[in-house]
């Protein structure tokens, strides 16, 4: 299970101040438990892990098997919360070169519906031309343009290549129980469907079929993922004392840093497999807290890669940042630095050492340098990249986000600001029903 260390924030904020949040956090926890806070119709994620049944997991695993048995490639079509959670978990658990491996143990997972790039979609459809592929069409609203557009292309191609009957077996929809175009199409075509509960918002939906189905298709153990999340649900429960509750401490610390002028939180990893965990985290915190002209700006870097680009800014730029490092304790493989007689690169001092030891010293050195440079540092230790630990990490961030949003005083469960660009795009594209907006926007150009 993950653990959290906030010691390296104490040169910047005081421990007493962080612990003084206890009552505020308790109130926030209560608002979540009793459903008395803002956005209380979106609290379905709160006790989701412990309420997932064996039958539900078996149903997901059975559908995943159909896709695994019948597809070389599976396209996950979705955007935002209907995409990032699955990708975060799959990339964290997969071999870094999985799609290049000759002997495949699972379909190649590809993502679409998260951009509107013509070249991306053209190149995808080209690649798929000689592939037996299936599609998981994921959209809570069922009307998101990016996803609907990609799905329209993929559905047609799948039917043309594999025939309508087979397409019906290998296209699965994850969407609303009743509403939306994705639901209507799935019902009409007879696709297998999974429901996204009304009371679980997109960015909190990774432990619904939105995340669980693609993760199972990719060959990972969703039972263990859910078990890790369920144990974390207990560890972060409202009944757990403040000092022992990682979600409470994380929420309090980041709010105290924010109140002390640290407006940007950078999520850091030293393992490229965690890149999409950061992308998922950015949506979770960005959409939950960035409103009412408030909110920590969630940013992310992959180290040591970005130490050679963003490292300068972090070390010596404006002191408005803090870092939260996801520190991976145990790696999966062993690789030692070889010794070299000529030693032309001068690296023989590392000979015989594990690569991970070098990485760990880069991590420790970076922490000390950044703290010295005025960057408060929190550290989340992830014991290893397993389904169980990742499940726990995801739930930890969700729970802390709910608490943190209430500490900030916003509704953490809506995202009204996302509509502005959509409205303009529809007006510019002359979508029926947007006639007035079209006229108004043209007058601005
Ligand atoms: O699942 P969907 O309804 O397609 O929504 C996908 C995503 O797009 C929206 O615009 C929201 O900003 C996100 O919170 C959501 O996760």
Image (tube, rainbow, N blue to C red):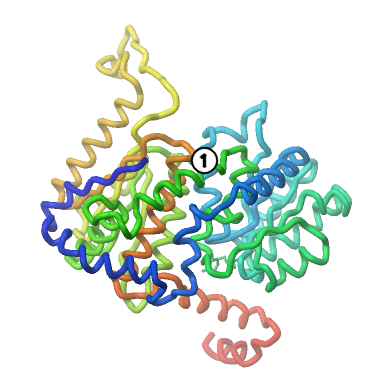
Residue extending furthest toward the front: 239
Q: Could you tell me which residue is drawn at 55 percent across and 50 percent down?
A: 86
Residue 387 x, y percent position in the rendering: 49, 39
Q: Nearer the viewer, residue 232 or 255?
A: 232
Which quarter is ligand 1 in?
bottom right
Q: Could you tell me which residue is drawn at 44 percent across and 71 percent down?
A: 413
23 horizontally vs 234: left or right: left
Is 441 drawn above or below residue 57 in the view shown?
below
Residue 152 x, y percent position in the rendering: 75, 62
Q: Determine the image quadrant of residue 108.
A: top right
Mark 1 C-beta closer than 8 Å to ligand 1: no
Residue extending furthest toward the top: 341
Q: Could you tell me which quadrant the N terminus lies in?
A: top left
Q: Could you tell me which residue is drawn at 66 percent across and 44 percent down?
A: 61
63 horizontally vs 144: left or right: right
Q: Nearer the viewer, residue 9 or 112?
A: 9
Residue 217 x, y percent position in the rendering: 65, 43
Q: How many marks?
A: 1
- Report which residue position mark 1 lands on: 224
Residue 84 seen in render: no
Q: Secondary structure at mark 1?
A: helix
Residue 309 x, y percent position in the rendering: 33, 46
Q: Nearer the viewer, residue 362 or 252?
A: 252
Q: Could you tell me which residue is drawn at 38 percent across and 51 percent down?
A: 234
Circle 1 Cα neighbour tier, 10 Å, few/some/many (<14 / 14–19 / ≥20): some
Q: Determine the image quadrant of residue 210.
A: bottom right
Q: Could you tell me which quadrant the C terminus lies in?
A: bottom right
Is 322 drawn above or below residue 107 in the view shown?
below
Residue 409 seen in render: yes
């Amino acid at each position: 299970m993950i653990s959290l260390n906030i010691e390296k924030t104490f040169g910047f904020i005081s421990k007493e101040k962080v612990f003084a949040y206890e009552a505020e956090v308790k109130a926030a926890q209560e608002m979540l438990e009793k459903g008395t806070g803002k956005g209380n119709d979106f609290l379905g994620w709160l006790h989701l892990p412990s309420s997932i049944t064996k039958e539900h997991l078996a149903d997901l695993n059975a559908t995943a098997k159909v896709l695994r048995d019948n597809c070389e490639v599976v396209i996950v079509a979705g955007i935002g919360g209907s995409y990032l959670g699955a990708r975060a978990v799959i990339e964290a658990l997969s071999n870094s070169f999985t799609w290049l491996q000759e002997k495949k143990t699972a379909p190649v997972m590809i993502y679409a519906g998260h951009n509107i790039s013509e070249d991306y979609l053209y190149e995808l459809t080209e690649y798929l031309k000689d592939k037996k592929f299936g599609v998981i069409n994921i959209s809570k609203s069922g009307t998101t343009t990016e996803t609907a557009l990609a799905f329209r292309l993929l559905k047609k191609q799948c039917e043309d290549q594999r025939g309508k009957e087979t397409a019906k077996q290998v296209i699965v929809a994850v969407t609303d129980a009743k509403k939306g175009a994705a639901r209507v199409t799935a019902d009409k075509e007879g696709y297998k469907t999974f429901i996204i509960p009304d009371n679980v918002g997109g960015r909190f939906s990774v432990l619904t079929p939105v995340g669980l189905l693609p993760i199972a298709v990719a060959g990972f153990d969703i039972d263990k993922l859910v078990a890790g999340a369920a144990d974390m649900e207990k560890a972060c429960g409202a009944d757990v004392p403040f000092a022992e509750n990682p979600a409470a401490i994380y929420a309090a610390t980041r709010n105290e840093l924010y109140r002390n002028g640290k407006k940007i939180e950078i999520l850091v990893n030293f393992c490229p497999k965690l890149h999409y965990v950061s992308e998922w985290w950015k949506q979770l915190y960005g959409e939950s807290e960035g409103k009412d002209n408030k909110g920590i700006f969630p940013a992310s870097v992959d180290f040591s890669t970005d130490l050679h680009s963003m490292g300068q800014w972090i070390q010596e730029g404006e002191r408005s940042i803090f870092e939260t490092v996801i520190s991976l304790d145990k790696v999966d493989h062993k690789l030692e630095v070889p010794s070299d007689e000529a030693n032309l690169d001068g690296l023989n001092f590392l000979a015989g050492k594990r690569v991970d030891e070098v990485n760990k010293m880069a991590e420790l050195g970076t922490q000390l340098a950044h703290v010295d440079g005025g960057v408060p540092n929190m550290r989340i230790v992830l014991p290893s990249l397993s389904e169980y630990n990742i499940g726990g990490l995801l739930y930890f961030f969700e729970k802390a986000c709910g608490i943190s949003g209430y500490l900030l005083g916003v509704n953490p469960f809506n995202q009204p600001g996302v509509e502005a660009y959509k409205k303009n795009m529809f007006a510019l594209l002359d979508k029926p029903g947007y006639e007035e907006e079209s006229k108004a926007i043209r007058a601005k150009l």
